[in-house]
């Protein structure tokens, strides 16, 4: 398996699948970042992708990352797979990089599988759309996580298999759950709406702020836990303009802290403008936290409640009507995921 990032939802999903396969008696190696946030439980981790994080930003760093990836990681991975092996590419990398890996692997008789996770071109350019189509068609099989994406992949000429979206979940620490409630300064009767994950314009935190502002007199409060991707300042200004007291925790959080925050909330809200599926919703399902989402992509297939309408008033009504639910067993979800992956692998 190749997942170059080493952190976040795609990496956590990769580790979950790797451990499932290892538990089924398969030999699994995960190739990822030199500074991957944690290792799989049963599979082997190869730290072969360098992000040169000690260099800061800039074009020189980007050049170093690309050069090292092409001259070291790609040949290293090519040597590691051969006939009768499976190379599973997780997520999507820079245009052409995964395509190169897939081409080399196929020439060596390797079965190539792709889980793109995002079945859309985020920037909407023609180049990005063509890159997505090329990546999909380079694989022997494509694994997606919603019926919507099965249809989308097949419309692009890719053979698609649907799996449940399972995540590598750190053991839930009750003390961390309590810590989050303390950080949020919640009283006994207050209910917390959590916006978790990247603060980016298409995630539409502004809708959540507007909705919770309408509900604040009913004992609801908003907590934000996630990494800033360019939208944090504007969202703080919006909350201030609405006189809404938000508990801000902006930054990248470790996996155990992050899942504890999801478990500590009463509602997790994902009103995304564009999506395929959501690791946040998958985590909320396992943690037992009620989830609310828009019906974009495959979100409605995983969320507990789907927003009808696009205005903040609709989201507020949906949040107010959502009911708590118990934690669900992970076993059935993981069994479905294992079966789907073995089918795509031809095993």
Image (cartoon, rainbow, N blue to C red):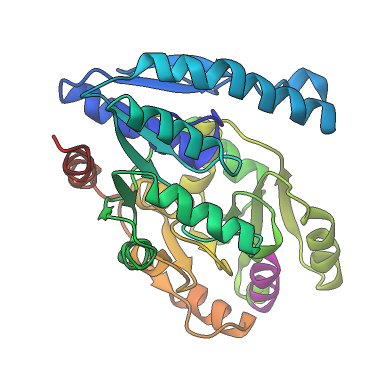
Q: Residue at x 52, y 32 (%)?
A: 255
Specify whether 33 is left or right of 286. right
Per the picture, the main secondary structure of the magenta-coloured stretch is helix
Return the x and y of residue 241 as percentages of the image width and height.
86, 71
Question: Does residue 169 appear in this view?
Answer: no
Q: Nearer the viewer, residue 205 or 83?
A: 83
Q: Residue at x 55, y 32 (%)?
A: 7
Give the quadrant of residue 291.
bottom left
> Vertically, is 236 above or below 227?
below
Q: Nearer the viewer, residue 290 or 196?
A: 196
Specify whether 99 is left or right of 222. left
Give the quadrant of residue 138.
top left
Return the x and y of residue 251 as percentages of the image width and height.
71, 39
Image quadrant for the C terminus? top left
In magenta, the rendered stretch is: 205-214
Question: Does residue 161 appear in this view?
Answer: yes
Return the x and y of residue 208 as percentages of the image width and height.
64, 68
Image quadrant for the N terminus? top left
Q: Residue furthest front?
A: 107
Q: Residue at x 63, y 57 (%)?
A: 127
Magenta span contains residue 103: no
Q: Nearer the viewer, residue 318 or 27?
A: 27
Return the x and y of residue 82 as percentages of the image width and height.
29, 20
Q: Residue at x 44, y 29 (%)?
A: 2
Magenta span contains residue 213: yes
Specify whether 138 is left or right of 132. left
Specify whether 166 is left or right of 294. left
């Amino acid at each position: 398996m190749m997942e170059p990032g080493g952190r976040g939802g795609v990496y956590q999903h990769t580790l979950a699948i790797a451990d499932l396969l290892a538990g089924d008696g398969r030999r699994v190696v995960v190739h990822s970042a030199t500074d991957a946030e944690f290792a799989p439980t049963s599979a082997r981790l190869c730290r072969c992708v360098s992000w040169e994080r000690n260099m800061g930003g800039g074009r020189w760093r980007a050049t170093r990352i690309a050069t090292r990836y092409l001259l070291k990681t790609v040949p290293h991975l090519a040597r590691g797979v051969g006939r009768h092996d499976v190379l599973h590419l997780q997520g999507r990398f820079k245009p052409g990089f995964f395509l190169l890996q897939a081409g080399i692997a196929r020439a060596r008789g390797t079965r190539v599988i792709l889980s793109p996770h995002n079945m859309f071109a985020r920037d909407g350019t023609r180049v990005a759309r063509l890159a997505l189509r090329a990546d999909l068609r380079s694989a022997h099989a494509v694994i997606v996580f919603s019926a919507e994406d099965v249809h989308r992949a097949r419309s692009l000429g890719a053979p698609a298999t649907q799996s449940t979206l399972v995540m590598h979940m750190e053991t839930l620490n009750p003390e961390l759950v309590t810590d989050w409630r303390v950080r949020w300064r919640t009283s006994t009767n207050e209910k917390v709406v959590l916006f978790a994950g990247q603060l980016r314009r298409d995630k539409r935190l502004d809708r959540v702020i507007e909705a919770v502002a309408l509900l604040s007199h009913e004992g609801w409060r908003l907590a934000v836990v996630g990494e800033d991707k360019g939208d944090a300042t504007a969202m703080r200004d919006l909350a201030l303009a609405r006189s809404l007291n938000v508990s801000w925790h902006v930054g990248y959080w470790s996996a155990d802290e992050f899942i504890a925050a999801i478990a500590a909330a009463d509602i997790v809200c994902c009103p995304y403008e564009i999506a395929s599926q959501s690791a946040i919703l998958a985590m909320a399902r396992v943690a037992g936290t009620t989830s609310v989402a828009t019906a974009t992509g495959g979100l409605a297939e995983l969320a507990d409640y789907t927003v009808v309408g696009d205005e903040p008033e609709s989201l507020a009504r949906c949040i107010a009507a959502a009911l708590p639910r118990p934690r669900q067993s992970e076993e059935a979800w993981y069994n479905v995921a294992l079966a789907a992956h073995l089918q795509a692998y031809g095993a």
